[in-house]
Image (tube, rainbow, N blue to C red):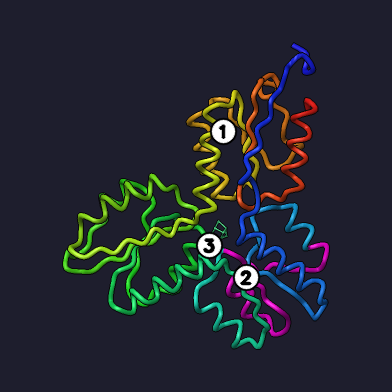
């Protein structure tokens, strides 16, 4: 079948792309770059998107990858990205005499405050999320007592706590809502006093719900996002479970799957760190038959 023979319908998710927190962080870095006021660094890549990170590098904005690297700096501005950082990083930035520009997403900041307050009151904190994710690393760094990170049902079942210890459960903002509920149910049976604050961000929930709705009616589904973006990976899982022909791409150039091209109804969604430009390019290529 020739590409032009296919009457193609493209459904682009309204919630595809940058969420409020990421847009705010990216804008903050570009504003700092405009000021041109000495060296600027982001603490970790500002978002999980190689194109944006390369563009920033071309504007002379560096990336700090570790606390050790930060400890060697004594001049410049450090921008904290939307994921947030542990409290000790704020201290280190100040001790080094560096300027601090905080672009932590307010929804993540709220989690920092919750875990700080409840742990100060002696509660054990449980974070539902991926222990290796920088956001979780940041949240852990605001806990004043003890903390556990749980990501799977198996971990939740194996997890033990003295039932007399009060437990406060929060979530990584990008965690899957249904999985979160399942894990909370298991954990809640282990202590007499459990407070659970669902800190999953609406932007993620809305994006996931819309992606699921589109994937259910689409013949093929395209999920766009950086390789290491956890929210894009989750979007992919959600779409894949509803639509067999789901592909995960980073840019329009990765779109080479002819199976997708032969589909009539193609859905498109994108993770929170995917720039609008890339989404538009993919959409254009799909409409024009690549
Ligand atoms: Fe913030 Fe939600 Fe985005 S927590 S960074 S607005 S996914």
Quarter of the figure that contains the C terminus: top right
Mark 1 to mark 2 CA distance (whole Å): 32 Å
Which is more foreground, mark 3 or mark 2? 2
**Disc 2 target residue:** 103
Residue 69 lies in the magenta stretch: yes
Q: Is disc 3 placed on a helix, strand or loop?
A: helix
Q: Mark 3 points at which residue?
A: 134
Horizontal and vertical percent position of residue 191: 20, 61
Q: Give SS at disc 2.
A: loop
The first of marks 3 and 1 along the sequence is 3
- Residue with the mark numbered 1: 214
Q: Which residue is at a point 45% across and 67% down the rendered structure image?
A: 111
Q: Which residue corresponds to the image point at 63% horizontal and 45% vertical from the top-left? A: 16
Contact check, label 3 and label 1, Cβ < 8 Å: no
Q: Report the magenta residues as a range.
A: 57-82
Label 3 and label 1: CA atoms lie apart by: 30 Å
Judge whether 117 appears above or below 225 on screen: below
Please name the residue shown 47% across and 69% down the image: 110
User: Which quarter holds ligand 1?
Assistant: bottom right
* Label of residue 265 in the image: none
Nearest to N terminus: mark 1 or mark 2: 2
Quadrant that contains the N terminus: top right
Q: Is residue 261 above or below residue 223?
A: above
């Amino acid at each position: 079948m020739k590409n032009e023979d296919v009457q193609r319908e493209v459904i682009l998710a309204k919630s595809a792309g940058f969420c409020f927190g990421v847009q705010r962080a990216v804008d903050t870095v570009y504003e700092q770059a405009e000021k041109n006021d000495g060296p600027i660094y982001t603490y970790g890549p500002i978002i999980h998107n190689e194109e944006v990170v390369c563009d920033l590098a071309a504007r002379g904005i560096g990336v700090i990858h570790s606390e050790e690297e930060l400890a060697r700096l004594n001049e410049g501005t450090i921008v904290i990205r939307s994921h947030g950082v542990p409290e000790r990083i704020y201290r280190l930035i100040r001790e080094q005499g560096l300027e601090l520009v905080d672009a932590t997403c307010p929804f993540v900041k709220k989690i920092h405050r919750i875990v700080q307050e409840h742990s100060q009151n002696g509660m054990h904190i449980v974070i539902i999320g991926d222990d290796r994710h920088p956001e979780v690393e940041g949240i852990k760094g605001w806990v004043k007592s003890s903390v556990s990170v749980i990501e799977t049902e198996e971990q939740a079942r194996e997890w033990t706590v003295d039932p007399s210890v009060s437990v406060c459960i929060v979530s990584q903002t990008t965690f899957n809502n249904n999985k979160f509920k399942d894990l909370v149910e298991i954990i809640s049976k282990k202590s007499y006093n459990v407070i659970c604050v669902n800190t999953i961000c609406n932007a993620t929930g809305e994006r996931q719900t819309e992606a699921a709705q589109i994937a259910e009616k689409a013949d093929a589904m395209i999920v766009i996002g950086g390789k290491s973006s956890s929210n894009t990976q989750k979007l992919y899982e959600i779409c894949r479970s509803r639509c067999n022909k789901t592909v995960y791409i980073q840019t329009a150039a990765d779109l080479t799957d002819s199976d997708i091209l032969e589909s009539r109804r193609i859905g498109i969604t994108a993770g929170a760190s995917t720039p609008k430009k890339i989404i538009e390019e993919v959409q254009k290529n799909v409409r024009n038959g690549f």
